[in-house]
Image: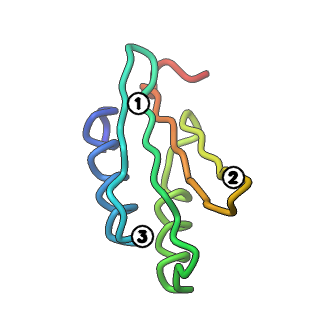
């Protein structure tokens, strides 16, 4: 998928299906950011689905994982236009 919007829809759908959580999406002119809570009981097949979605991202996109003091976890993905890498 070429456009950032189309990639955002695809990535958000994959993350939602894998985690059972509703991703949050925010957009500005340079980046679309998707965040999703990672359940503590995420199964191994679901974890592999998340990793596959991340592995399919082009090099212009970034992602990461945050763990809060209460042990909750959040995955974030930042999508950029392929012609405007960071």
Depth order, front residue of 27/71: 71
Mark 3 or mark 2: name the one nearer the start of the chain. 3
Depth order, front residue of 19/29: 19
Q: In the shown orientation, is residue 71 left or right of residue 52?
A: right
Residue 30, quarter of the rendered image: top left
Residue 3 x/y as whole percent = 29, 33
Residue 83, quarter of the rendered image: top left
Residue on which the image places disc 2: 68
Quadrant placement of the N terminus? top left
Residue on which the image places disc 3: 19
Dots 1 and 2: beta carbons under 8 Å? no
Q: In the shown orientation, is residue 86 left or right of residue 18?
A: right
Depth order, front residue of 15/21: 21
Relative to 15, say whether 77 is above or below.
above
Q: Residue at 45%, 53% (x, y): give it.
A: 36
Residues under labels 3 and 1: Cα distance? Answer: 20 Å
Mark 1 or mark 2: name the one nearer the start of the chain. 1
Q: In the shown orientation, is residue 44 left or right of residue 71?
A: left
Residues under labels 1 and 2: Cα distance? Answer: 22 Å
Q: Residue at 65%, 52% (x, y): give it.
A: 65
Residue on which the image places disc 1: 32
* Within-10-Å neighbours for mark 1: few <14, some 14–19, many 20+: some
Residue 20 x/y as whole percent = 35, 71
SS at mark 1? strand
């Amino acid at each position: 998928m070429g456009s950032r919007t189309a990639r955002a829809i695809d990535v958000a759908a994959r993350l939602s299906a894998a985690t059972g959580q509703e991703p949050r999406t925010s957009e500005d002119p340079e980046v679309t950011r998707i965040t999703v809570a990672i359940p503590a009981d995420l199964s191994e097949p679901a974890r592999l689905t998340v990793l596959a979605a991340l592995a399919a991202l082009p090099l212009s996109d970034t992602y990461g994982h945050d763990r809060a003091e209460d042990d909750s976890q959040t995955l974030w993905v930042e999508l950029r236009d392929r012609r405007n890498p960071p």
